Amino acid sequence: MTLSSEVPDRIAEHVRPWLVNWLGRHGRSIESIGSWAVHPGGPRILSTFAEAVGLDRDKLDASSAILAECGNMSSPTIAFIIRRLRDAGAPRPCLAIGFGPGLAIEAVLLD
């Protein structure tokens, strides 16, 4: 599987409005999220996500570290990131988010 070079542009354009709406439906906001588990399709995905959502890049340190240590392992990658955050005692709620084929967005709140 390869990622289209358009993926970061689509994330930049669509992720923040989608995320604000989705979190709002759950009584949350971007600012209320304690930690972030973002599936790293690659370094550009992470930097684009952080910029689009308005996060300091260090909020994605766990995602960056797993990408550097293990690469993109496809679906299991997010579990490794969540475990890293859990082991570090990261604040809750944690938002785990990934991007799938056709640029589907999948997210879960972990309280």
Image (tube, helix red, strand yellow):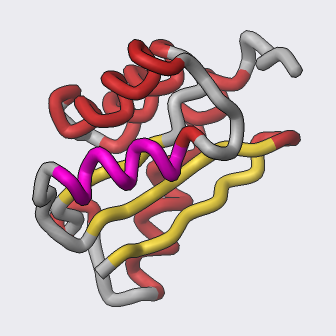
On the picture, is 80 further left or further right than 101?
left
Q: What residue is at 55 percent from the left and 64 percent from the top? A: 107
Position above or below: 89 against 24: above
| Bounds of the magenta segment | 78-87
Q: What residue is at 78 percent from the left and 18 percent from the top? A: 3
Picture quarter with the N terminus: top right
Position above or below: 80 against 30: above
On the picture, is 51 further left or further right than 75?
left
Q: What residue is at 22 percent from the left and 27 percent from the top? A: 57
- Residue closest to the eye, 33 or 74: 74
Q: What type of secondary structure mainly makes up the magenta span?
A: helix
Question: Residue 81, image x and y in percent?
Answer: 40, 44
Position above or below: 72 against 109: above
Q: Does the magenta portion include 42?
A: no
Question: Residue 7, image x and y in percent?
Answer: 69, 25
Picture quarter with the C terminus: bottom left
